[in-house]
Image: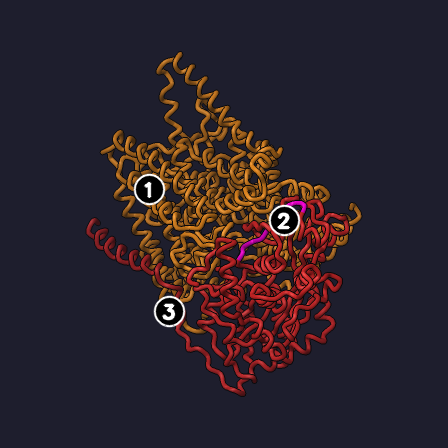
Amino acid sequence: MTRLFRRRGTALAVLTTAALLGAACATPNPHGTMADAHEGDPLPSRVRVLIPYAEGGGTDVWGRFIGNHLGGHIETGTRFVPENVPGGESIIGSNRYARSAGNDGSEVLVSSGTTYFQYLLGRPEVEFDFGEMRPLVINGSGGVIYGSVEGGVTSVDDLFTPSTPLQYGGISITGLDLSAVLAFEVLGLDVTSTFGFEGRGPARLAIERGELNVDYQTTSGFLTQVQPLIDEGRAVPLMSLGQLDDAGEVVRDPNVPDLPTVPEVYEEHYGEPPSGPGWDAYKTFLAAGFSYQKGLWVREDTPDSVVQPVFDAVRELQRDEAFLEQGREVLGGYPIYPGDEVEESVRDALRLDDSVREYVLDLLAENYGTVIAGS
Amino acid sequence: MLDAAASALGGFLDPQMILMLISGVLAGLVMGIIPGLGGTGAVAILLPFVFVLEPQQALALIIGATAVIHTSDTITAVLIGVPGSASATVTTLDGHAMAKQGQAARALSIAFISSMVGGLVGAIGLTLAIPLARPLVLMFGSPELFMLTVLGISLAALLSRGNVAKGLLAGAFGLLIGQIGAAPAAAEYRFTFGSLFLTEGLDLVAVALGTFGIAEIIALIARKTSVASKTGIGGGWGRGFRDVLTHWGQVLRGALVGVWAGVLPGIGATAGSWIAYGQAIATSKDKRRFGKGDPRGIAAPEGANTSIAAGDLIPTLLFGIPGSAAAALLLGALLVFGIEPGPRLITQDLDLVYTIIWSFALAAVLGAALCFLLAAPLARLSFIRFPVLAGGLVVIMFVAAFQASQEFGVMQVMLLLGVFGWLMKMCDYPRAPFLIGFVLSIPLERYYFLTESLYEPTEWLTRPGVVVMIAILLAPLLFKLVKALLRARRQRNAAPASVGAGATSEGTSPGAAGSGTDTDDQGERSNDATTGGDGAAAEPVISEPGPTFTGTYWPMSLAGVFLVVFGGAWVMSQGFGEDARLVPQLVAGIGVLLTLIVGVQEYRRWREERGRDSEWRTEVKWTAHALGWLCLFLAITWVIGAVLAAAVFVPLFLWRVASMRPVPIAIYTSVVVAALVLLQVLADISMPMGWFTPAFLA
């Protein structure tokens, strides 16, 4: 018995060591040859939609919703099957896509603002490159900055000459909050930002409790959650983040057409339109975080014959009243575009000049004590 | 308001609604039974249906599932000590202890009835709370939430079975492990060692299944006995029913604590269940049976966990802030139907809100009733030889843990934590404080920083809610101090007569070391839960019966490991940025201090009990053997993926360890493999891939 134990013990020790050593290794990738498609190949009958966010979240719902409806408008009856790989601020899933996806369209990637931001900031972990992908579908979003009346903010003027210190609450400086922070930078506002909120919802609660007095919400969140507060006279809308048009200019948000945009507020106060690296940074992150926020992407070398059916399906969806009505909340009130129509402007928008990136990284390092590793 | 409530009730006359609700209940029950899948699994299964069903039906489906997950996750927690979901870990204490005494059916019926009551209380609470919920939630600002996390962590002391230093050390370790990943107040990652999957932090499922489940499994596999060491005399469901009647106050209190924990965003179901358990101990006169199969230790947390899911609906519906995976699914579903949760939901879609509440109540009753009917047959599982159960269990647990980040490393982390949990158990550390520390680590830090940067100290420390909680925190300490002083005086008067009674607070008795079953522990266990012995020492005794390493080098070595871990963490945290450094540094520093205290205690104890005949070598061999099998499974998975690994590992294990015959082995294996394939195909549960997984399994 002892001998048996001893022999077994040795074998087990070896096994244990081997398995624990594996801890240093990455997740295995099954040996599969990466699909290599050519012009003329059709869209596969089953498309895996890789969603780098958790089940049930906004981006997940968007990806599933779009996938479901695209399927119904493609003649070959292609099924879009969602697969969630959340984690690491969406880098884990997006990296996996970059590593393993072929160019036959059998796997597509869902992106959101956070994904673009990691890419734009040049996080060292990022292995994906939107410059080497083409968009299939793009859907925008927008944001509104508002203030708390009880917190001493009753108009835009209070931002420039605040009676009580301006307090903004966010989740993380490297997330979508960066757009709001850049807006404050462009306007030259003296805002104290506190990060660590669990989400935009808890930050909104903090506004209601009087812990904060400036906040931003996505337009749909603004219309449903903040408008009641405005009606009660407890909150006041200040400006919209604006939308980037095809020419790369910031224009009014169609969902809140009465609100001035950030550059309008700037011009009103300073008498000239905004400029400089801060402004360029604002526009880039506005595009990435809002105007082109959500999208389906494939590898750049995916043949036209594969992606064309999707573009056509999107064009049909654009005219499908039932779809638009049903998707009011999921699409956030913003149109969806087929990739071929917006490819150029999206790519332009996602290109960040080195000087502008330098400006943002300096801003993060100096004002927010955040150094992006490896940059 | 009443109109809406009534019209929503009328909606249930539609047979299709009922059908959907029942389908949801069944899906939720199944997902709850499978260890580790719980809410996430239910989300994965039900999400696709959201896009094809009518809004009301889809809601009934989702609510049906959410309402019962925490009813059925108790089953494995009680029967095999492996929690079905993270919040069921609390039931592994008393529920599993009861099962070991052959009273699994009694434990299960207490749990199911309490869950049912909890669900009903939750639904009624929701109905009444809706008009009040908004001001209530708003009353709880960052300072109050911060104090609440402090209060939760202070449970560590209450749950530390007599040895406060060890309990606090376990709690500090949990806090430290919880710090892995992104810092809440700074854009910085901590303790990730360059690994991307650790940036999300360790997954709760992996941590709970590891420290409680794996630790239990590796201790039981090689022993080849069944879970229950006695035959099930007098432990039927009728007994459980009477237990609930006796302790109805505990059930109700647990349920109310649950609603509250659910309503507050940011606390979570796991911490909520433990808080309910903690209050049960705190409010009970005789605390010594907690952890050894006390019906109150099942009734209170089980009453809570279903009502937490109910309370969770408030922040989800009123503020659009989901508190769990299941609530996130509900939110997503509402979004698909074009309904944005928010204050207007109450004014515009009140009937929808009531549909949700009534569905919840109905599902909770239905689910508990189904489980109740199954309690007696299920209880028989605890009499099956454990290795027979373990074969499939191992596979399912690793697959479940894999779901979180779908990285191979998660499964290795779970295994490592399993070893750690086993060591803690053997060296007499309570594991409950560890888990509480882990779940509250980031909330504690988050709300501390928010409080600190949004308020002046004089401002937040004087808020009424904070003052009340500080009082709750300090009162027991003062009370204990006074009592200790009184007792010291009394003891001085009545000389050495009662020295022996004090020793019980050490938890497991040293004599049980290595004996395989918990014979010693049963000695002091009478059949009736309410006999309180002499009742002199009112210390809570939470023990997990089993052999300990008392009198060997092991406890001191483990203290050494803790010292290295905390010391290393302290050194590493020096390199973090200002806002990311504070908490890990503090926790590591406290951890080092506690380790030194515990180290000295262990040394003294070793001096006293050194050389006592102990079978620790056998115990270690058994465990290493079991651990080897788990490693083997991981190694095979690494090479060929989980599905094929199951096809290889399960028969091998059943043959070598469980000594089963070929035909049952073949049937068993095909069932496990078929279940995995079904989960993958139908429920979108992803299976770990290996280097050579064939394409059709990908």
Task: Return the residue at label 2.
Answer: A166
Look at label 3 and name its amino acid.
Trp
Distance between mark 3 and mark 2 Cα atoms? 54 Å
Q: Foreground mark, 1 or 2? A: 2
Name the residue: 61% across, 57% down. A188
Task: Return the residue at label 3.
Answer: B691
| Colour mapping used in the image | by chain
B429 to A282, vertically: above or below = above
**Chain letter of the residue beneath label 3 in the structure image:** B
**Chain letter of the residue beneath label 1 in the structure image:** B
Indicate the position of residue B428 as horizontal and vertical percent values: 36, 37
Name the residue: 72% across, 76% down. A319
Distance between mark 3 and mark 1 Cα atoms? 38 Å
Letter of the chain in red: A
Magenta residues (range): A163-173
Look at label 2 and name its amino acid.
Leu
